[in-house]
Image (cartoon, grey):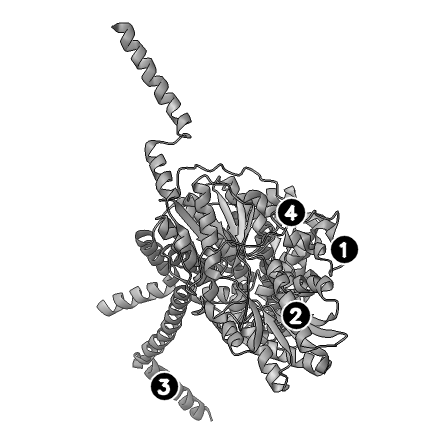
Amino acid sequence: MRRLSFFFAALALAAFALAPAFGQGLTAAQQANLKASLAVDTSVLKSADGQQLLAPSKDNRKVPTRPADPNKLPETDPLHWYDMEWAGWNVTPTNIPKSPGDGAIGKKVIMIVHGDHPWTTACILGAQKVADMYKWDFKAQSPNWDLVKQNQLIDQAINEKPDMILLIPLDAKAAIQQARKINAAKIPLHMFNTLPDNAALNYSLGWTGPDDFGQFRLLARAWSDELMKRNPGASTIGVAYVQHNPGGSPFFARSFGPISELATYNRKIKTLVMASPTPAAFDANTTMQLVSDWLTKYGKDLKGICASDDSAQSLGIFQALEKAGRTDVVVVAAGNSKQGMDLVKDGKLFGITYQTAEGDGALSAQTAADWFNGKGYPTRKNLAQHVITKADVDKFYPPQW
Amino acid sequence: MRSSGRSSLLALGDKYRIYILFVVVFAVMSLTAPKFFNVLNFTAIFNAVTMNATVAIGFTVVMICGQLDLSIGSVISFAGVLTMGLQPVLGFAGSIAVAVAGGALVGLFNGLLVTKAKINSFIVTLGTMTILQGSIYQFSGGNSISVTTDEVFKISDFLSKNIVPLITPQVLLTIVLVLVVEFVLRRTRVGRNFYIVGGNRTTAWLAGVPTDNYLNSAFVLSGVTAAIGGVVSVLVSTAATLKLGENSLMYVISATIIGGTAMSGGKGGVLRSVVAIMTLEMLYTGIILFGLGNEVKIFLAGLILAYVVLYEAYAVYRHEKALGQRPELMKELAERASAARSRKSAGA
């Protein structure tokens, strides 16, 4: 009897010790949470414009091999931009925490964005929709474009010991130390929207967001086709680029993306000029003055304009075109604000990129949820790409911002 | 008696206004804002204010002298860009020295234009601000500049790590600078002369104070502290962004005024400005912890500024009213003047 009770005690002890191995180290409550989390279906969510919030990307391009020194290649060569366009694909993961695999429901997640803007509001709303599905303790904070304040928010977020920090880096280079700091505190980090320096991604679970280069390559092809249609028989077609704020990845992606794409897709298109309106890149009046100068200088040779923004910049461009009495210039831009979509609908803007703000926030949140659920974590995941033209603009109303 | 007690209470309130405001904001946020009252949060707040607090030291001295320095934001960015941009060539010791010396030179340039060319400091420093902004873009090619060596990460980690609870090396540096300048201003003849220059430049000059030297020194100090603020900030974040100092100008001006430094000069203090920065930072942090937006932050900062300006106006009104309520003084003055006239006519 004594031996029997000893046997049962040993059996119970062994069962207790081995139980985690069978249930991947999870308690019964955690397993139930995982099961419930995996059952959550976020594919039913819609953004304000009626689109699927988490639309899968159809981009199936293969990641090219990195040239020995991309900077030695000409700027018209797509591989010159390799470290920006393909940032995140070649990282060395450093002290990346392992997924608890205990389910996404009930996690505490802090999102730190870059600044206050209607786009940001829509982005946070998208993330909130996913957070609500998983019943997260979720909060989003904004440093209002101030790097010192963003560093403070990161410190405060670390102090709160959340299950995950979602970060839009305010500055690509400063993101390295921010990511190191969060990583050192053993808090999982996911970066999204703006691309940080490649080194920052060593400390991040991954990155999700718009593939600016990819989007603009797509836009460039549509733009080129329209330019050829409107200028049949032309030997060269002059175009100009209104650039983003200097320094960030959009500054390069939204001008050198199409330039390097058109260098192979349509050699008839020649870049006449490119500049960022100063002192304010996103000011209609400043853009109008810049484009008016171009129209005076290049006259009829200027057949197309590619803008980094479909609201203030595009309004400035069309003010300048109207003053010059030009209706032949094909204008495309990064989108998709209400102003931009209205301009497309009016037939002024030929095309804009579909940059879903809600989808951007939602994708970052969903990727985090997948990690909590123990699913594979992509180093980099792009948002779905699309070019909105007059033919399909109505599908995207009401606008997200 | 009752009235006298009330007025001395008001006088005390006037004198310690910023400290009272600090305590009120601290108490309200500690009691109401979620996760506000903890050491880690205060460490984050201390770290966040170091740049603007350092910058406010020199700026306050310029304002005590009755002048304005609008170039501080650009000097912050300029020093930051120089620190990171020159590091590969000069090493950190060299690049930091050049950055701080650059700040001093900008300050001297401002000071000389104000004192020798007799140009209004608002115009001079507005010009310097614009020139520096252009230089920064020229130097950096429009990009942020970073150094991604182990050395810079170690420096950053060191500057952000607590040496004692709440205090990191970057905070300690600011505290030392504040205490030294506050001591000089309050306890030395040189310091008091800054107030005399700001109070009435002509009187100061008649009293033998070399006013131009003091004004030049104030601008140099402002350039140096702005540069130090920029240097420390980029060392912590390991990157020099072109817009680093963009938000500092309005922030520091507001804090200095809220702290009680008079725009007309002759009144104020460095410690008071720094306490005002701490107060604003606690308020902003509380707003964030409440989950409120930037618009609330701007609104409340504006509200405090408006309160302070109105309070100052009310204090002046009360002071003048108090003078008017003592007719015996006016009577005595009139009698003296009359006696003097009588003596003069008798003598004639």
What kind of element bears circle 3? Answer: helix
- Judge depth for marks 4 and 3 and give the one in front: 4
Q: A326 and B134: which one is in front? A: A326
Front of the two marks 1 and 2:
2
Closer to the eye: label 3 or 2:
2
Q: Name the residue under label 2.
A: A225
In the foreground, B2 or A147:
A147
For residue A269, side relative to residue B2 (left or right): right
Give the CA distance from mark 4 to mark 3: 76 Å
Report the disc number at residue B334: 3
Would you call the spot at circle 1 few (<14 residues within 10 Å), some (14-19), or many (20 or more)?
some
Mark 4 element type: loop
Residue in the image at 69% along x and 62% along y:
A261
Quarter of the image for the N terminus of chain A: give it: top left
Marks 4/3 same chain: yes
Pointers 4 and 2 in contact (CB under 8 A)? no
Q: Are marks 1 and 4 on the same chain?
A: no
Q: Indicate the chain on which mark 2 is placed.
A: A
Q: In the displayed structure, would residue A122 be above or below residue B34?
A: below
Instruction: Pick whichever of labels 1 and 2 is earlier in the sequence.
Output: 1
Query: Which residue corresponds to mark 4?
Result: B148
Residue A73 has which mark?
1
Pointers 1 and 3 in contact (CB under 8 A)? no
Give the amino acid type for the residue marked by disc 4 in the picture. Thr
